[in-house]
Amino acid sequence: MKLLHSADLHLDRSFEGLKAFPEQVGQKLQDVNKRVLHNLIDTALKNQVDAVIFAGDTFHQSQTSIQTQAYFFEGLERLIKEDIHVMISFGNHDYYSAERYWFDFPEQVFLFEQEDVETHYFVTRNNERVAVSGFSYLHPWIEENKLSEFPRRASEADIHIGIYHGELSTNRDSRYAPFALSEMKALGYDYWALGHIHKPEVLSADPLIVYPGTPQGHTKKEIGVQGVGVVNLGNGPATIRFEETAEVYWEKTRYSLKEYRTKKEALTFLEKGLFDEATHRQTFLLKEIVLTDIEQLGEAFQIACTNGEILSYLQKKTAETGRLFVFQLSTKGESSFQKIPIRASAQLLEQLEKNYLQPEIFAEAAKELLQQPQFSKMQPIDALWREKCIERADQHIKEYFMIKEDQ
């Protein structure tokens, strides 16, 4: 059989880290997620796959807009029309609740609707009997290893596939279904369709255990995107190849200016190089620039780098190409942002977050906000909202602070 494996699509996620951009760039980014989904469906149809697996975090939010859900359901209909089996598990971002969906999932789409592991069976066009075992998140976190719930390879199946949204970890404090590779291999499955890690990675060749990574990077850290995995199963060892589906790519490039003696020469070099690169691109590029060897160019050039003058000029010029946009510029390899170090233990942070999930403690911390009548009308004050707030706080802490264990 032939399978398309996708994970961490994050359909409703915006492009993060872009502080300001021209209107033409905004228009370019507006429908990217929709086009990526279209590319994914096209890839499945072109390869005449028997099945498509979405291995968690298809959506970035647990509650998504009507428009986002509508074009996802349209994509599902395209697959079903070609008799392609579709299986969806839900991850820590889009953890499952039936009430959140504006539309009914088609009957031909199998949903893993619970945190308990279950197994779905189907038959391919070539009469191969396939078993697919998996689970979904019903909350932002699953702290236990789920592999103990997976059945051993089904004797009545020609092919057995596992779906697992979690992280390879020996850290018992992991919140995302930590698992051990040896335990996964011991179950005897033919293929493991993983999700959660956005960087593509093959953890094992026999059996084939794969993170396909996100099909579309949404932050500057998500480089090296390879798209979706097209997997062949049933005749000998499983094989995989990646096919790109992204519409936008991120890149960080260093430019040495040591050969240039004047600011005019340096600016001309940068502008021409970026323009030449843009003319040869088929997809849109979000580019971070690091300038080195600038001391000889004088104080005015260095000030123009620091105050954003050069960045603003290059942004205007690159935006006009329609294929490239410089979103950040720094010098001497120094990032414009550094995490703030704090001394604490990861266990303490975890315990504090658990404490704030308690209604009384959360209400005390957020009492000024909760006292606003307009807010309560717009946002239900319930357990799901508390969980989402704590999840986002955890993300922001890890983004802006570097936690160092006390010695």
Image (cartoon, helix red, strand yellow):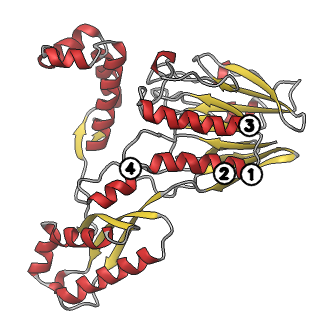
3D distance between C-alphas at marks 1 and 4: 28 Å
How far is mark 2 from mark 1, CA to CA? 6 Å
Of residues 124 and 103, which is closer to you in this image? 103
Mark 3 to mark 4 CA distance (whole Å): 29 Å
Q: Is residue 228 above or below residue 316?
A: above
Name the element at disc 2: helix
Q: Is residue 213 visible?
A: no
Amino acid at the residue labelled 4: Gln
Q: Amino acid at mark 2?
A: Thr
Q: Which residue is mark 1?
A: 47
Relative placement, left or right, of 46 versus 354 is right
Along the line of sight, the residue nearer the viewer: 40 or 385: 40
Q: Mark 3 or mark 4: which comes first in sequence?
A: 4
Q: In what element is the residue under mark 1?
A: loop
N-terminal of the pair, mark 1 or mark 4, is: 4
Secondary structure beneath disc 4? Answer: helix
* Residue for badge 3: 84
Residue 56 place in picture, x, y as percent: 55, 33
The earlier-in-sequence mark between 3 and 1 is 1
Q: Determine whether, in the image, residue 215 is placed left or right of residue 16.
A: right
Separation of disc 3 and disc 1 at Cα?
A: 11 Å
Q: From the image, which quarter does the N terminus lie in?
A: top right
Q: Which circle, 1 or 4, is nearer the viewer?
A: 4
Secondary element at tag 3: loop
Marks 2 and 3, the one that precedes in the sequence: 2
Which of the numbered marks, if any, corresponds to residue 323?
A: none
**Which residue is under mark 2?**
43
| Picture quadrant of residue 398 | top left
Q: Position of residue 306 (x, y in %)?
A: 14, 67
The percent coordinates of residue 155 (x first, y second) are 88, 24
